Amino acid sequence: MTDLNKKTEISRRNVLKGGLAAAAGAAIGSGAITGFPTIWAQNPITLRQFGTGVSNLNAIAEKCKEDLGITLEMTATDSDAAAQRAVTQPDSYDIADIEYWILKRSSPPASSSRWKSRA
């Protein structure tokens, strides 16, 4: 059981802990600490997604626009067309929603220079 009558001791340690928390909060709030990723879009954002028809639901696109302000362009394809597009047109989409079983067909071999990091 805890003793409700026990007084909180003011110690150097407690003051430092509380002071450091307050200082950290003030620094983060003021923008003195930077380096965290921030999305501040000045222009409308549009994401291009393709996949099979079961993943292209208009309700998702509408909710995305309503909650996030992001336009989601959905394109329905069959499984083979999705795999082909994922490999041959990598700059034509932002989100490739393809089935797990077709992943081996749409992932290039490790030696493919086209899929190496562009950094």
Image (cartoon, grey):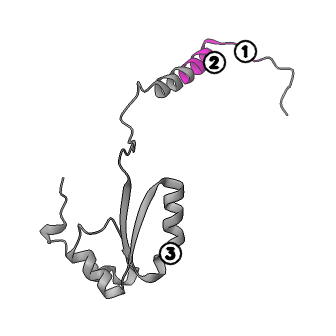
Q: Nearer the viewer, residue 6 or 30?
A: 30
Label placed on residue 14:
2
Type of amino acid at the residue the image marks with label 2: Asn
Label placed on residue 57:
3
Q: Looking at the image, do the residues carrying marks 3 and 1 touch, with CB atoms under 8 Å apart?
A: no
Q: Nearer the viewer, residue 33 or 57?
A: 57
Label 3 packing within 10 angstroms: few (<14), some (14-19), many (20+): few
- Tell me where the magenta segment starts and ends, as one range: 8-21
- Residue 115: image location, x then y, percent: 19, 67
Label 2 packing within 10 angstroms: few (<14), some (14-19), many (20+): few
**How far is mark 2 from mark 1, CA to CA?**
8 Å
Q: Which residue is mark 1?
A: 9
| Quadrant of the image containing the N terminus | top right
**Residue 111 on the magenta span:** no
Q: Nearer the viewer, residue 112 or 17?
A: 112
- Residue 35: image location, x then y, percent: 35, 35
Secondary structure of the residue carrying tag 2 is: helix
**How far is mark 3 from mark 2, CA to CA?**
54 Å
Q: Is residue 72 above or below residue 33?
A: below
Instruction: Residue lying at the far front in this picture: please name it.
Output: 43
Type of amino acid at the residue the image marks with label 1: Glu
Question: What residue is rendered at 85% in x and 26% in y?
Answer: 3
Q: Nearer the viewer, residue 19 or 118?
A: 118
Label 1 packing within 10 angstroms: few (<14), some (14-19), many (20+): few
Q: Is residue 38 visible?
A: yes
**Residue 16 on the magenta span:** yes
Question: What residue is rendered at 49% in x and 59% in y?
Answer: 65
The first of marks 3 and 2 along the sequence is 2
Instruction: Look at discs 3 and 2 and give the one toward the viewer.
Output: 3
